[in-house]
Image: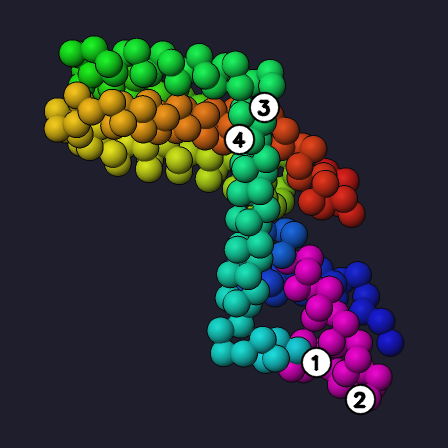
Amino acid sequence: MKLTESQIQELYAFTRQHFVEHYDLQTELVDHLANDIEKQWQVQPKLTFEDAKNKAFKKFGIFGFMDAIEQKGKAMNKRYMRYMWTELKKWFELPQIITTIALFLLFYIAFSTVYIAPLALFFFGIITVWCTYKGIQLNKQFRRRKEVSNKKWMLEELIFKQAGSTMFVFMSQLFNVYKIPDNYGDNTYFLVLFSLAFTIIALVNYISLEVIPSKAEKLINETYPEFSL
């Protein structure tokens, strides 16, 4: 005995009612529930769809789908960080390493002057303004994509919405950026590390807000080939 199309759609609605927002996880859970229900019917052919569905759901425990949501979120975060790390490594290989070195030297030379504090705030401001602008753009893109597909994918949301979180982490360090140079500005090792930190921060923000979103379609299709987005 197999589930009908309408029953499959009921399972999708059921997952949404239990706070599963992302279509990729909904599909995994629907497949799991459907298989469980069909196995129950093999043993109890007269069992109603509703009873079989509730029995299948109870096997997820008292927290329902929350554990599945958490596990899927961790898996997608790991995948996203792998993309980030892969792209970051490219900036330390030819030919991108030339740009990385030039960026580092720009920061180092600027921070070696007596104007280290105002220059640090200047660079900080440029990066923050750019990140804010890109973050707003990506959020608009994400909303448009959702309107077109009427579905939300976990990796897609990470690519278009989590990217902006790096900017907020960066902004939270505003006070340190202003005060630290006053205490360590004449230390060569500090200047090297400070310049390197600014270089890495600039690269990470560029990768998360520009490079990875530009490859979103490719990455999403690789992750969900069965859906051919």
Residue depicted at x 53% and y 55%:
74
- Judge whether residue 125 is colored magenta: no
Residue labelled with disc 2: 44
Mark 3 to mark 2 CA distance (whole Å) = 62 Å
* Kind of element beneath mark 3: loop
Mark 2 to mark 4 CA distance (whole Å) = 55 Å
Residue labelled with disc 4: 88
Mark 3: amino acid: Glu
Mark nearer the viewer, 4 or 3: 3
Mark 4 and mark 1 lie on one chain; the one further toward the N terminus is 1
Q: Looking at the magenta stretch, what is its main secondary structure? A: helix
Residue labelled with disc 1: 52
- Judge whether residue 36 is colored magenta: yes
Residue depicted at x 28% and y 31%:
171
Which of 180 and 159 lies nearest the eye of the viewer? 180
Mark 1 to mark 2 CA distance (whole Å) = 9 Å
Q: Residues within 10 Å of mark 2 (few under 14, many from 20)?
A: few
Residue labelled with disc 3: 93
The quadrant of the rendering that contains the N terminus is bottom right
Mark 2: amino acid: Gln
Residue depicted at x 78% and y 47%:
226
Mark nearer the viewer, 1 or 3: 3
Mark 1 and mark 3 lie on one chain; the one further toward the N terminus is 1
Mark 1: amino acid: Ala
Magenta-tinted stretch: 26-55
Mark 1 to mark 3 CA distance (whole Å) = 56 Å
Vertical side of 193 occupied by 46: above or below? below
